[in-house]
Image: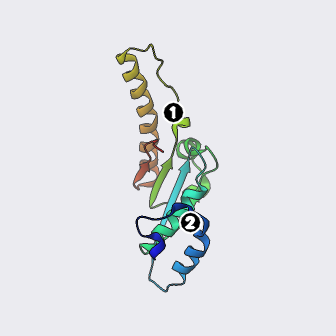
Amino acid sequence: MKELEYPFDSEYILKKSKKIRRQLLESGAGFLDKKIAVLGGSTTHDIIRVLEVFLLQQGIRPQFYESEYAQYWQDAMFGNEELAALKPDIIYIHTSNRNITAYPEITDKAEEIDNLLERQYLHFEVMWKKLEEEYHCPVIQNNFEH
């Protein structure tokens, strides 16, 4: 599908995602079914809409679980029946800078900054390990960049 070739118009894809989705599903292609959990620290609905059309374009028909707004940590650490029932093939954690729990002060020394970074990393690492142990699938987390 030409609309999904690089360079693409992301606004157009988002605006026409339902139509593009329908066309891809009606193409008659054989699809590989994959279950994807999207755990969000921010709004993820539009990410899922766009991700779905690109996956369909590649022959993958996704079934999504989407966490409630800013509930990624709760779903990962305290369980969720709907997520467990999905038995995801992959988990994507979508976070933003709002999910960083502590930022350095301008007066902090390098050692203090390193400690803040290590604590933040460990916070997420605990979650990654818990998800891997629970669901036995790859876990991907974005890198906070725009």
Residue 12 bears which disc, if any?
2
Q: Nearer the viewer, residue 136 or 113?
A: 113
Q: From where the camera sits, is residue 87 visible? A: no
Q: Which residue is mark 1?
A: 100
Q: Is residue 68 left or right of residue 126?
A: right
Image coordinates of residue 79 in percent, x first then y, are 57, 47
2 or 1: tag closer to the N-terminus: 2
Whether residue 88 is visible to the viewer of this picture, yes or no, is: yes
Taking the spot 49% from the left edge, 86% from the top edge, the residue there is 28
- SS assignment at label 2: helix
State left or right for residue 44 relative to residue 144: right
Residue at x 40%, y 17% (from the top left corner): 112
Residue 73: quarter of image: top right
Comparing labels 2 and 1, the label whose residue is closer to the camera = 2
Q: Secondary structure at mark 1?
A: loop
The quarter of the picture where residue 109 lies is top left
In the rendered structure, the answer to whether residue 133 lies left or right of residue 12 reads: left
Reply above or below: 34 against 109.
below
Identify the residue at the far right of this view.
Answer: 68
Q: Please, what is the three-letter code of the amino acid marked with disc 1? A: Ile
- Residue 60, image x and y in percent? 45, 72
- Tag on residue 2? none
Task: Compare residues 52 and 36 and report the one nearer the observer.
Answer: 52
Binning the other alpha carbons within 10 Å of mark 1 as few (below 14), some (14 to 19) or many (20 upward) gives: some
**What's under tag 2, amino acid-wise?**
Tyr
Identify whether 36 is placed above or below 19.
above
Residue 118 lies left or right of residue 51; in this view the side is: left
